[in-house]
Amino acid sequence: TANETTVTTQEEQNVETAEEEVTESDVVLETQADAFAIEPNKVSIEVGGNPVTLRTNAPADTTVTWESSNESAATVADGVVTPGNVSAETTVTITAKAVVEGNEVTATCEVTVKPAAPTFTSNPVLTTDKKYKSGYESAHDNGYYLYFTDSGKGATNYQILCDGKVIVNNAKPSNGSNNKYEVLVPSGSHSYVVKAIGPNGQTAQSAAKSISISGVITETHSYDWYCKTKKTVKAGGVTIPKGTTLPAVGRSPKKIKKFKNPKKVQVIYKGRKVWVPYKSLKGGVKARVNVKQDYSRSLKEYMVNSKDFSKKTNEGSAIRGRAITSGDNTLIWACLYTQRAYTFKKSGGKWVLDHSDRITTGKFSHPTRSSETSGIYTVNKKKAGKVWMVQQNGKRYYFTHASYITKGVSFHTGTWWASGKKRGSVVKNGKPGTYGCIRMYTDGAKYIFANTTLNRTGVIVTRFD
């Protein structure tokens, strides 16, 4: 019994030893063959970039062969992957083959080949150019063209900035006379640059260009009508001393007949509105006009072409909301504030300033039509010869080249007495002084006479308030 027990124990030991040896051998084989892999198993390379080296976890003396699924996109030799040439992102499978522990094994690596990033060497140069280099308003014009060139490459977008704020996006480099960007420069000094933006967010910026504008009317105010007492006046329960300057705020409440001054004028004295006799006023009522400069040319064009001209600054308060139209290719704007008549011609679907003339309009007692509000008219009558008028005292005078926009109101030349002596001229400082008509220099009156069509040419008369 003891011998049987010893034999059994030895057999068991032999079996256990054999089982342990087989199991250990199998584990080693699985680790080296079944776990065969490429490190790393996923990479990204760029056309024109550096090669990438791949390795396997096979024993050092193992022979490994490499293959690429798309050799035009990427090649592989001894584990070194070199990018080829692709126009779009391409996925390539790199395969490694080897014999490990007598077993053929394979492993793969996913390689993403990306096109070469565009070269970004942008060097934008911004140029500023006055819209108008000659003419009556050129010295103070605030219309500018901006354009730029770029000797580099790679930019995917360009922006033009004013004082750091983008005013043009997706701008295009200049191509001769093309790709010029017109800007209406606000009054004051402003800095402009062009920024180039690359495909990966890179930026390059031009040198700044400064534009300074002064002397351009950017806000308007109503006329300041005033008068002086030529003697002490008692009216409305107050006594107004002789020589007192008073703001005039209203006319006679009765209808003013042509060529007749009002009997009374409403003024403000010490905060009170008082009606005073017109005959008590020295020289009647005059306009105090402090504006000696004109709107810039670009601003005029913007005002007649824009549909949403600013109401907040009063810059176009009499034009806003108006459909400025004309039955032909000519439009006349008589601006009572600046005391000028502007003639525009239609070009490319927009009104372009063609002529500008000084004018003298109606005085306080005989205002030009629509001096209180704006109006839109047409030229409905014209006469080139002498148009005779008669003063209240019976003296006769005449003017010529009258272009009527409404009954009794016309654009016309200065006036002459019947004797041929000059009677009334255009007031050089632009102060109103007529009986309601729009008096012009002779050349200006002739220009409007020649450039208007009866019942077709549009005319707008405005005053800003």
Image: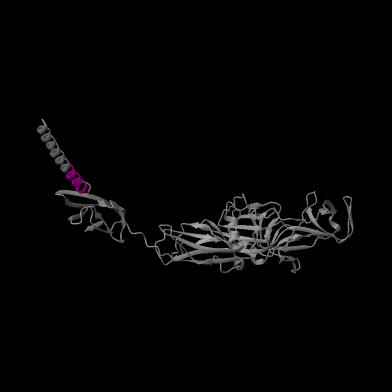
* Magenta stretch secondary structure, dominant: helix
Residue 439: x percent and y percent? 70, 62
Q: Give the range drawn in magenta.
A: 23-33
Farthest residue, direction top: 1
Q: What colouring style does the render use?
A: one colour
Out of 461 and 143, give the one closest to the viewer. 143
Q: Quadrant of residue 295?
A: bottom right
Whether residue 210 sits left or right of residue 396 in the image: it is: left
Residue 428: x percent and y percent? 71, 67
> Quick check: 163 above or below 38?
below
Residue 206: x percent and y percent? 48, 65
Q: In which quarter of the image is residue 289?
A: bottom right
Q: Is residue 252 visible?
A: yes
**What residue is shown at x 56% (from left), y 64% (from top)?**
191
Q: Quadrant of residue 70?
A: bottom left
Out of 324 and 395, give the one closest to the viewer. 324
Residue 84: x percent and y percent? 26, 59
Count of marks placed on residues? 0
Q: In which quarter of the image is the C terminus?
A: bottom right
Whether residue 300 sits left or right of residue 8 in the image: it is: right
Whether residue 454 sits left or right of residue 270 in the image: it is: left
Farthest residue, direction front: 2
Out of 249 and 356, give the one closest to the viewer. 249
Is residue 448 rendered magenta in the image? no
> Quick check: 251 above or below 441?
above
Out of 448 and 181, give the one closest to the viewer. 181
Q: In which quarter of the image is the N terminus?
A: top left
Q: Is residue 176 visible?
A: no
Is residue 27 rendered magenta in the image? yes
**What residue is shown at x 25% (from left), y 52% (from top)?**
38
